[in-house]
Image (spheres, helix red, strand yellow):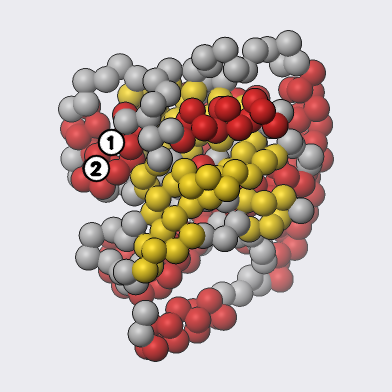
């Protein structure tokens, strides 16, 4: 990363602000969510206390996507189908894609893959930063309604899993009596391979969001369309982890690398940094 790029990224991050009313709304909204989710967590624990979650359970994998047919095929789908653990269903939700996503997905003659297309609807203040914070919320929540597995696993369309991700995660949860876990990740940023450091939220370590692996009775934790209004933990998946960890779910973090993130074609880095560097291009694509 050259000096100009670094300056651009840092300046943009410094200017990200939340107005008073949005901050106040998010505080009240989060408080209400915390109470509701605290109750539902304990209710569901009792409801499913005799359920066997470890006898070759069905795992539901879900992916939100928008106009990335080629990447979806070459990364996420390819990665999922190579999993050593085979008892899964794979839900792919197209958020109003206008490319050949549907055709590509349906070209895979695998009954475990289930494709859905929803109408694209922007429910956040329209700018590229809020797209990053809240963009996948609607397709993610739609996917959660369709799940049938005893465990849930999230993977974005441009991500690659280790071939044993599901197998490792299930084993780790069984060994440590967990409801929710994440794992370590590797990424390429400006041609350098880096091991992502886990976040520490509510005294719990959070690895890559694409290694979220959790019991299905936690699916009442919906992704929050108002996450962009928060002053901290504004990205939708970090917000989800924040809420799950805050109400006392049994959470673990594995140091084994289960997630690999590469720049998309013709890009240099990943995540919010890349979005800042190509802001105008992304605005044209998404808005």
**Percent coordinates x, y for residue 173 in the rendering:** 63, 30
Q: Nearer the viewer, residue 180 or 29?
A: 180
Q: Which residue is mark 1?
A: 78
Mark 1 Cα-neighbour bin, 10 Å: few <14, some 14–19, many ≥20: some
**Percent coordinates x, y for residue 19 in the rendering:** 66, 72
Quarter where residue 9 is shown: bottom left
Left or right of residue 287: residue 255? right
Residue 15 showing in the rendered view: yes
Q: Secondary structure at mark 1?
A: helix
Question: In the image, what residue occupies the spot 37% across and 79% down?
Answer: 1
Question: In the image, what residue occupies the spot 76% across and 22% down?
Answer: 45
Image height of 272 relative to 167, above or below: below
**Percent coordinates x, y for residue 188 in the rendering:** 37, 62
Residue 137 showing in the rendered view: no
Left or right of residue 201: residue 103? left
Q: Which mark is residue 74?
A: 2
Which part of the image, by quadrant, shows the C terminus?
bottom left
- Label 1, label 2: how far apart the Cα atoms are: 6 Å
> Cβ–Cβ below 8 Å for labels 1 and 2?
yes
């Amino acid at each position: 990363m050259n000096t100009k790029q670094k300056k651009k990224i840092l300046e943009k991050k410094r200017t990200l602000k939340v107005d008073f009313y949005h901050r106040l709304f998010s505080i009240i909204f989060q408080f209400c969510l915390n109470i509701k989710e605290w109750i539902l967590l304990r209710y569901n624990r009792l409801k499913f206390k005799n359920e066997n979650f470890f006898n070759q359970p069905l795992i539901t994998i879900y992916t939100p996507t928008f106009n990335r047919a080629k990447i979806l095929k070459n990364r996420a789908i390819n990665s999922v189908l190579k999993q050593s653990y085979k008892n899964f269903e794979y839900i792919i939700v197209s958020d109003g894609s206008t490319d050949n996503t549907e055709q590509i997905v349906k070209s895979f003659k695998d009954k475990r893959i289930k494709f859905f297309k929803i109408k694209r609807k922007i429910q956040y203040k329209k700018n590229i930063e809020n797209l990053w914070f809240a963009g996948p919320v609607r397709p993610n929540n739609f996917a959660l309604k369709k799940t049938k597995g005893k465990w849930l696993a999230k993977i974005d369309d441009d991500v690659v899993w280790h071939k044993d991700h599901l197998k490792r995660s299930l084993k780790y949860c069984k060994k440590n009596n967990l409801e929710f876990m994440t794992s370590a990740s590797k990424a390429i940023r400006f041609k350098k391979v880096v091991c992502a450091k886990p976040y520490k939220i509510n005294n719990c370590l959070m690895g890559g969001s694409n290694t979220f692996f959790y019991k299905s009775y936690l699916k009442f934790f919906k992704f929050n369309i108002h996450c962009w209004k928060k002053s901290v933990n504004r990205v939708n998946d970090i917000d989800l982890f924040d809420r799950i960890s805050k109400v006392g779910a049994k959470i673990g973090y594995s140091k084994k690398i289960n997630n690999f993130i590469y720049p998309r074609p013709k890009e240099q880095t990943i995540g919010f940094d890349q979005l800042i560097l190509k802001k105008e291009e992304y605005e044209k694509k998404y808005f």
